[in-house]
C-alpha cells in the first residue's frame, strides 16, 4: 500500500495504490498552504478506501515548491561561490549571465581560486588550500550559511571539491555545501549555475521536508516518504534536503511515468493537459526523454538532467475569444470552478467548449447551449491544432507514434491527431501524475570522460555501469532490482587520447 501525491499549480492530486491497483483517488484545488492540501488529499483517499495509516509502506510526493521559489525569487539564501580552476576560466566569472534581480537575491560572493583538472584528471594547478580557508573566514564574517563549490572537470575527478568542502567546514561546521560534481554535468558554467541554484534553496529544502514530515505526523503515518525527481525516479527526504534542484520539472515527469504505467506503452508521446498548460513529452523505455541541450530555469542556464518537455498554453481553464479563434495562453487556472461558464462564471474557457461540443459532461451544459455552433467548431479546431503542432514539434521522425492523453484537461481532445497512430485516454488519466509518483523507482547516474587509449572501452563501460548502479543503491534502491536504463557514448573529437564522454542511468525498486 502506498500513496502518490502530486502538487501542481492548479490541482493537488493523490492516489492510494494497492500493488498495481488504484484503490482511491483525489483531485482538488491546490491550497495556499500546500501542506494543508497534502493532508486533505491523503486523508481523503485513506477515508475513501477505509485504509488505516499503519497499512502504508510509503508516501511519494511530487512538489513544485523549489521550482516556484527560484522562478519567483523567493526564500533564497545568499550563496558563497568557490570556483577552483585558476589560471583557467578567469575571463568568465560566476553568474556572468544571470538576471540582475536573481543575482542580487543570491548575492555576488565569488572566490576564484587555483585548482581544477584536465579532461583526463591531470591537474591544471594544485588546490589553493590557503585561499579556500580565507574564503571560509570571509563567508563566516558575512554570515553566509550556504556555499557552492565548482571545479573544472570535477565530474571526471571530484577530489578538489571534496577537499575544499572539508576545509570550509573546519571554519563553518554547519555550512550547507553544494558540490557541482554531484549535480551537473561536464560544462563548467552551467554545472556551476546548477550548484549555486541548489545552494540557494538549502534552507527552503529543510523547511519543506520538515513540513511534509509534520503533515504525515498529523495523519499518524509512520511509513517513509520520498520526493519525485525530474528523471522519473525518487529520492529520500534526506536526499532532497541536499539536492532540491533535482525536483525541478518533476510534475510533467510524474505524469509521463503514470501515462506509461496506465497505458502499458513504453514508447509514445504524452500530452498532459492541466488547468493552465499542456506539457508534451516523449516516452523512451517508459521514462521521459531527457533534454540534450542546456535548460533555462528562471533565466539561468543549467546542464543537470531535465526532461525534454514542451509547455503549451492550453488547459481546461484556457480563455477562449468570443469568436472562437483564440484559445489561451491566458487562463483562469485554479479559479476554473468559479469563473468558467458551465460553473456559473462569465469567462468562456476551453472546458466550456468541450461541454458545448458534446464530448464532456462537466458542470451545467445549459449555460453554454446558446453558444453559436461556428464559434464552438472554430474553438474545437484550434484546440486540436495546438495539440497537433506540439506533437509534431516533439517528434524526431515522420513515423506515427501512439499518443497518450492524461491530466484533468484530457477531455479537451476528442478527435484524431495528425502524426499519432492512435489516441489513448487510459483509465485514471486525470490523476496520472499522482500514479507516476507512487510507482516511481530510485535512480542513479554517472557522467564521465574516459580516454579509451588508456582504458579499454569494455572496462570503461563496465566501470560506468557499476558506478551508476551503486549510486542508485546509495539513493535507496534494492540492489537486486537495479538495472541500467540508458547508456550513451559521445566521442570528444577535439580532445586527445580517444576521449569519449559516457553517461549511464540506472534505476531499481525501492528498498522495503
Image (cartoon, rainbow, N blue to C red):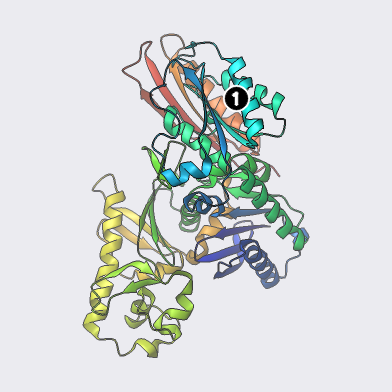
Q: Residue furthest front?
A: 141
- Expressed as whole percent of the image width and height from the top left, the position of residue 229 reads 54, 46
- Expressed as whole percent of the image width and height from the top left, the position of residue 469 reads 58, 31
Q: Nearer the viewer, residue 382 or 83?
A: 83
Question: How many other residues sit within 10 Å of disc 1, few (<14), some (14-19) or many (≥20)?
Answer: many
Quadrant where the N terminus sits is: bottom right
Q: Nearer the viewer, residue 474 or 331?
A: 331
- Expressed as whole percent of the image width and height from the top left, the position of residue 58 reads 69, 52
Q: Which residue is mark 1?
A: 135
Element type at mark 1: helix
Residue 443 shows in this picture? no
Q: Residue at x 28, y 76 (%)?
A: 321
Residue 142 shows in this picture? yes
User: How many numbered discs sit on the rendered protein?
Assistant: 1
Q: Residue at x 47, y 23 (%)?
A: 448
- Expressed as whole percent of the image width and height from the top left, the position of residue 201 reads 58, 44
In the drawing, does residue 377 fall left or right of residue 488? left
Q: Nearer the viewer, residue 317 or 161?
A: 161
Q: Residue at x 64, y 43 (%)?
A: 241
| Rendered position, 305 above or below 48 | above
| Rendered position, 68 above or below 171 | below
- Looking at the rendering, which quadrant does residue 411 occupy? bottom left
- Looking at the rendering, which quadrant does residue 219 occupy? bottom right
In the drawing, does residue 222 fall left or right of residue 245? right
Quadrant where the C terminus sits is: top right
| Rendered position, 442 above or below 81 | below
Amino acid at each position: 500500500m502506498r500513496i502518490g501525491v502530486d502538487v501542481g499549480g492548479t490541482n493537488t492530486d493523490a492516489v492510494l495504490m494497492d500493488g498495481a491497483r488504484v484503490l482511491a483517488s483525489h483531485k482538488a484545488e491546490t491550497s495556499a498552504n500546500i501542506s494543508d492540501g497534502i493532508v486533505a488529499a491523503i486523508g481523503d483517499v485513506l477515508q475513501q478506501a477505509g485504509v488505516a495509516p499503519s497499512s502504508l509502506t510509503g508516501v511519494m510526493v511530487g512538489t513544485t515548491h523549489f521550482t516556484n521559489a527560484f522562478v519567483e525569487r523567493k526564500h533564497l539564501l545568499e550563496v558563497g561561490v568557490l570556483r577552483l580552476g585558476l589560471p583557467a576560466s578567469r575571463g568568465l566569472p560566476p553568474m556572468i549571465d544571470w538576471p540582475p534581480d536573481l543575482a542580487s537575491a543570491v548575492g555576488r560572493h565569488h572566490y576564484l581560486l587555483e585548482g581544477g583538472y584536465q579532461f583526463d584528471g591531470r591537474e591544471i594547478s594544485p588546490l589553493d588550500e590557503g585561499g579556500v580557508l580565507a574564503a571560509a573566514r570571509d563567508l563566516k564574517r558575512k554570515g553566509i550559511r550556504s556555499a557552492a563549490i565548482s571545479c573544472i572537470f570535477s565530474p571526471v575527478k571530484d577530489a578538489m571539491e571534496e577537499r575544499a568542502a572539508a576545509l570550509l567546514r573546519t571554519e563553518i561546521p554547519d555550512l550547507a555545501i553544494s558540490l557541482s560534481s554531484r549535480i551537473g554535468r561536464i560544462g563548467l558554467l552551467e554545472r556551476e549555475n546548477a550548484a549555486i541554484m541548489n545552494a540557494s534553496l538549502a534552507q527552503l529544502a529543510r523547511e519543506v521536508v520538515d513540513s511534509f514530515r509534520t503533515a504525515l505526523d498529523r495523519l499518524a503515518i509512520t511509513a517513509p516518504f520520498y520526493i519525485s525527481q525530474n528523471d522519473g525516479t525518487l529520492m529520500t527526504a534526506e536526499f532532497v534536503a541536499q539536492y532540491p534542484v533535482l525536483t525541478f520539472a518533476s510534475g510533467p515527469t510524474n505524469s509521463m511515468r503514470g501515462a506509461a504505467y496506465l497505458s502499458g506503452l513504453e514508447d509514445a508521446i504524452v500530452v498532459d493537459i492541466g488547468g493552465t498548460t499542456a506539457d508534451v513529452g516523449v516516452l523512451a523505455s517508459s521514462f521521459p526523454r531527457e533534454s540534450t541541450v542546456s535548460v533555462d530555469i528562471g533565466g539561468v542556464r543549467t546542464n543537470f538532467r531535465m526532461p525534454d518537455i514542451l509547455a503549451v498554453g492550453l488547459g481546461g481553464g484556457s480563455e477562449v475569444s468570443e469568436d472562437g479563434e483564440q484559445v489561451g495562453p491566458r487562463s483562469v487556472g485554479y479559479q476554473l470552478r468559479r469563473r468558467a461558464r458551465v460553473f456559473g462564471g462569465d469567462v468562456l474557457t476551453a472546458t466550456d467548449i468541450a461541454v458545448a461540443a458534446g464530448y464532456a459532461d462537466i458542470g451545467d451544459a445549459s449555460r453554454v447551449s446558446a453558444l453559436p455552433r461556428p464559434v464552438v467548431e472554430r474553438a474545437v479546431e484550434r484546440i486540436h491544432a495546438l495539440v497537433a503542432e506540439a506533437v509534431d514539434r516533439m517528434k524526431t521522425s515522420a513515423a506515427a507514434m501512439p499518443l497518450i492523453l492524461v491530466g484533468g484537461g484530457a477531455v479537451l481532445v476528442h478527435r484524431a491527431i495528425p502524426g499519432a497512430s492512435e489516441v489513448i485516454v487510459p483509465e485514471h488519466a486525470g490523476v496520472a501524475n499522482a500514479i507516476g509518483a507512487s510507482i516511481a523507482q530510485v535512480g542513479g547516474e554517472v557522467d564521465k570522460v574516459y580516454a579509451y587509449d588508456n582504458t579499454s572501452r569494455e572496462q570503461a563501460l563496465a566501470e560506468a555501469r557499476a558506478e551508476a548502479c551503486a549510486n542508485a543503491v546509495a539513493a535507496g534502491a534494492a540492489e537486486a532490482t537495479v538495472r541500467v536504463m540508458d547508456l550513451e557514448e559521445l566521442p570528444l573529437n577535439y580532445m586527445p587520447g580517444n576521449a569519449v564522454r559516457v553517461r549511464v542511468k540506472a534505476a531499481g525498486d525501492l528498498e522495503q
